[in-house]
């Protein structure tokens, strides 16, 4: 790994450099099936069982041999003898149905051997609780839910790298799978830096300071968790090289990916970068990115652990998170292709990029609304550190390097913000 | 409450009867802001702080009085005296800037009193580390992030009954709110019934039985949790009135809503209904619903606790859950209007209702796909107990009582299934 020059990197180039040097942790763990919601499958799943496990009855009635009643009619009622044995739900079938015999069966009960049809109880007449009269022919497989008709043994039912959904847990359990191999959730250390920050929300009440509450740390941590990682919230870190080194060293040992927030700038003050450079010869390999907001983002490695150095202001942090951290979390979770949920929407206003950053990749936050089943996107622009801006949006549009404008009427792809940003929720500043 | 006749109820009428007799639990609890993701706000939130708390600097440089440099130019450089006091991030401003004075300030630092503009350090010349030379006039508010410009004290920033999103947690903490009142999550007891069922996934290995794994219980429990409730999984209950009574009694004491699964039918065997009827004079108030699948669903009360009696087969259970349980969970969570995420899609095949159930409300499961930014829905029909059917779908269409067909090309509203059923995931049966 060599250091690259101190120019601005395109997003793609920076990410490519990162990927080329990365070792993807492919650790897996075995989890109980009903605790596997949202986890990523390690392997394909092949059914080792039939569902249903045996031919089963769809009705309360009698299992019979259809041939026995081929000639049944009102004029020619056929009487079958009720067998002593009858179905008990969940018990493996053992009874062999004899010619001329009927077998009491419940809905869901397993068919006795040699039987091939069910006649519902309401279409029969019971005689002396020992015989049953049938006045119509019954087709083979009538009301029979046949073995493997839902799922056949040997069929591939789920694919590796698939997200386990609610239904899948039911499927796996039905197939008698009690534990399943999934990729371990990546551990992501989040280190917010800055002397101006506090983790004590009510801090100012106590000591007449008025530090800014560290909200970016918990926001990023929360996004990590929502997107399938496990965040390690390392708390506010002052602009102190020694303390920062200790936290980063702790993060190297205990996480798969390190995110720092703040302490990075286009100017001279750049405490995070200089700390990392002091800790490793590889250091920051891409610093200053053609990303607006978020151009002071840095990417690098410390002791082979990838580190994303994010800007302090919320818009810059979020952009760096969506562009770099999110695909890494996805990759480290066992999903090489990231599954961002996006919706086509029509722009309701023009948007123009900031002049200095025409050839950058731009992230445009929008307010997505749904009117009569159509989606509309209104760009929401403002200060990079504005919390109200982020609160007022529910998605973002990625504008490529060669595009400088979005026009009213343009159809854009809006990436829904993770973490309950559904459309049409009641909105701040509605 | 009186018993209603034993006819089929429309979905709306049944739900109306339920609502008329229901007492909505409106309990709230105070939770730490950063643990409030997805919770429902009890009250409107009015900002009690300005953000930023004081006028702040956007740049590293000097806070000045703009009037002091009105006439500055290269030919007429103006020299200001650097004050001894300088900004420390997070410390409430106390220094009063004198005429002719400049105050060292960092990005994010609070402006001293009487200052009104910032000049970036790179546009100045430092003289003997005591004086600063300025060669251009600076406009008032230049590089100043003014008090309350992001959020003004007194503004309503969030609304009661709003879902708390990731961004909202940041907003609340920024406003110095450390704990927030939210509605308590409703407790939902889930009681799967049936002698054929087992909770032991590997059951058949041990005792040569071949019971069916109870998957509907965990699926419904999981949906309860995904949708903002807390499920109380009460485990498989045999078809035994005494045991069922004890479980229901336990559920009455420990939950807000009771769901039973199975043991209900259109025929004579109806152990859940008869158990409930035996426990209370109110009993089941609406049984047999014009809902396909799911017509044997029952709704009622035991000791004033609402109970939803769901069919055993998965499609019937899910339909009863989506139609009755989901809106109740939403209501009990503090959200009177349910926020189902739906997407417009074009049907790619015709669909026809089952003949017997023309005037029922129909739930049609579909496979939603996205091709070139457009959504398409393919109906997926099959046996009511089919697990593969549910695995193969990611949404459903509600077909009203007066509609019997959906046609290829129709645009329908697809409700996305909760629990990771995004579009374009790799699918079972491709």
Image (cartoon, coloured by chain):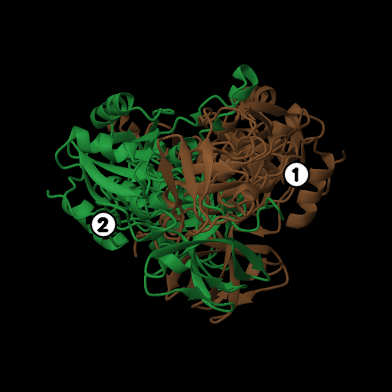
Chain colours: A brown, B green
The image shows residue A139 at horizontal and vertical percentages of 61, 55
The image shows residue A153 at horizontal and vertical percentages of 73, 40
Residue that mark 1 sits on: A155
Q: Is residue B220 left or right of residue A94?
A: left
Residue at 44% from the left image edge and 70% from the top image edge:
A370
Report the front residue among A135 and B86.
A135
Label 2, label 1: how many angstroms apart (C-alpha)?
41 Å
Report the front residue among A82 and B392.
A82
Mark 2 is surrounded, within 10 Å at the Cα level, by few (under 14), some (14 to 19) or many (20 or more) other residues, namely many
The image shows residue A339 at horizontal and vertical percentages of 65, 53
The image shows residue A382 at horizontal and vertical percentages of 47, 63
Image quarter (top left, top right, bottom left or bottom right) of the C terminus of chain B: bottom right
Residue that mark 2 sits on: B14
Question: In this rendering, is residue A80 above or below B402?
Answer: above
Badge 2 sits on which subunit?
B
Q: Residue furthest front?
A: A75
Q: Is residue B146 left or right of residue A238?
A: left
Report the front residue among B387 and A382.
B387
């Amino acid at each position: 790994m060599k250091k690259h020059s101190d120019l601005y990197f395109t997003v793609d180039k920076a990410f490519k450099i990162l990927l080329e040097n990365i070792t993807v942790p492919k650790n897996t763990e075995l989890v109980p099936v009903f605790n596997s919601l949202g986890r990523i499958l390690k392997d394909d799943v092949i059914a080792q069982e039939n569902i249903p496990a045996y031919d089963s009855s769809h009705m309360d009635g009698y299992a019979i041999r259809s041939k026995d009643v081929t000639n049944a009619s009102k004029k020619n009622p056929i009487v079958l003898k009720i067998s002593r044995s009858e179905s008990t739900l969940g018990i493996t079938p053992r009874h062999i149905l004899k010619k001329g015999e009927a077998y009491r069966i419940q809905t869901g009960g397993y068919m006795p051997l040699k039987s091939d049809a069910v006649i519902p109880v309401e279409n029969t007449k019971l005689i002396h609780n020992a015989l049953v009269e049938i006045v119509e022919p019954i087709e083979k497989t009538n009301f029979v839910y046949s073995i493997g008709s839902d799922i056949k043994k040997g069929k591939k039912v789920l694919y590796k790298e698939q997200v386990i959904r609610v239904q899948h847990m039911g499927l796996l359990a039905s197939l008698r799978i009690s534990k399943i191999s999934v990729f371990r959730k990546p551990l992501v250390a989040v280190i917010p830096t800055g002397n101006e920050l506090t983790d004590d929300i009510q801090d100012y009440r106590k000591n007449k300071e008025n530090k800014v509450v560290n909200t970016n740390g918990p926001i990023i941590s929360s996004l990590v968790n929502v997107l399938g990682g496990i965040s390690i919230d390392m708390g506010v870190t002052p602009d102190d090289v020694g303390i920062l080194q200790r936290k980063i060293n702790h993060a190297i040992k205990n996480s798969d990916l390190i995110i720092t927030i703040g302490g990075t700038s286009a100017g001279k003050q750049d405490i995070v970068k200089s700390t990392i450079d002091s800790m490793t010869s590889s250091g920051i390999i891409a610093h200053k990115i053609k990303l607006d907001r978020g151009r002071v983002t840095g990417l690098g490695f410390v002791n082979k652990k990838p580190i994303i150095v994010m800007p302090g202001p919320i818009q810059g942090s979020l952009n760096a998170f969506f562009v770099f951290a999110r695909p890494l979390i996805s990759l480290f979770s066992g999903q090489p292709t990231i599954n961002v949920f996006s919706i086509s929407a029509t722009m309701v206003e023009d948007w123009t990029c900031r002049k200095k950053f025409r050839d950058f990749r731009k992230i445009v936050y929008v307010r997505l609304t749904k009117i009569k089943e159509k989606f509309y996107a209104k760009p929401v622009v403002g200060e990079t550190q504005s919390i109200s801006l982020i609160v007022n949006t529910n998605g973002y549009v990625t504008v490529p390097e060669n595009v400088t404008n979005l026009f009213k009427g343009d159809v854009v792809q809006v990436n829904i913000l993770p973490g309950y940003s559904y459309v049409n929720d009641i909105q701040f500043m509605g």
